[in-house]
Amino acid sequence: MNIKEKILKVATYSQELGLDLRREEDRFKWFLASVLFAKRISSQIAKRTFKEFEREGIVTPESILEAGWDKLVEVLDSGGYVRYDFSTASNLLEIVSSLKEKYGSLESLHTQAKDSEDLVKRLLEFRGVGPTGVNIFLRELRGIWEKAKPMVSPIAKKVASKLGLKEEEAEYPDVESSLVRIGLEFCKDGKCSICPVREGCYQANIT
């Protein structure tokens, strides 16, 4: 098994959440999850909170609006998302209202975007959605949305370099997302001994 095959065996966050991004409804769910992941909060809390949204059936634009601010705060708190509960609830309501008013749906937003740069620009116009959230969302849509071609994240570039990959190889569908996960969950905390791609990493083999 070559290093790229080993990388692809590391599940992306959307895969771990059980989402199939070829499905329109799951692409919105991933957008919701990306908003949660983008805050300075642990991935475990973000995943747990997303699962609470799923459990409550609040995973569509309509259900978010119907839930209202108080219910959103309650769901965020139940997932442990207490540090950003108030602001995230407000942002979600504003994002969804704006999305429906201006585009109707995420799919329509993508269709109306002129190119990949315009797609990023349109997503950044939503309240509380910054470059980190947009990158999290779009990198897992490479190969699915035609215009999903975000810049490769610095974390992915760093891990790719350690593994002897060229930067353009990090742009293959799912590769960047897996590289980011490796960087955040193994490299960042020095967990080289249990890293799934340890054998291909020059840094792990010299420490």
Image (cartoon, rainbow, N blue to C red):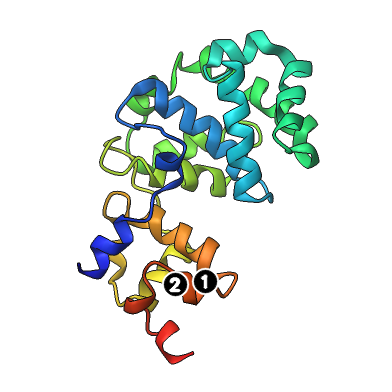
| Residue with the mark numbered 2 | 158
Determine the residue located farthest toward the front in the rendered image. Answer: 194
* Res 101 → quadrant: top right
* Left or right of 26 on screen, residue 146: left
* Res 74 → quadrant: top right
* Left or right of 157 on screen, residue 55: right
What residue is rendered at 40% in x and 61% in y? 179
In the foreground, 156 or 202: 202
Asked which secondary structure carries label 1, the reply is helix
Q: Which amino acid, mark 1?
A: Cys
* Left or right of 55 on screen, residue 202: left
Q: Position of residue 188 (x, y in %)?
A: 57, 69
* Left or right of 182 on screen, residue 86: right
Q: Position of residue 44 (x, y in %)?
A: 61, 47
What residue is rendered at 28% in x and 49% in y? 173
Does label 2 or label 1 sit earlier along the sequence?
A: 2
| Residue with the mark numbered 1 | 187
In the foreground, 176 or 101: 176
Whether tag 2 and tag 1 are in contact, CB under 8 A, the answer is yes
Kindly report the distance in space between the C-alpha atoms of the residues bearing marks 2 and 1.
10 Å
Q: Position of residue 184 (x, y in %)?
A: 54, 62
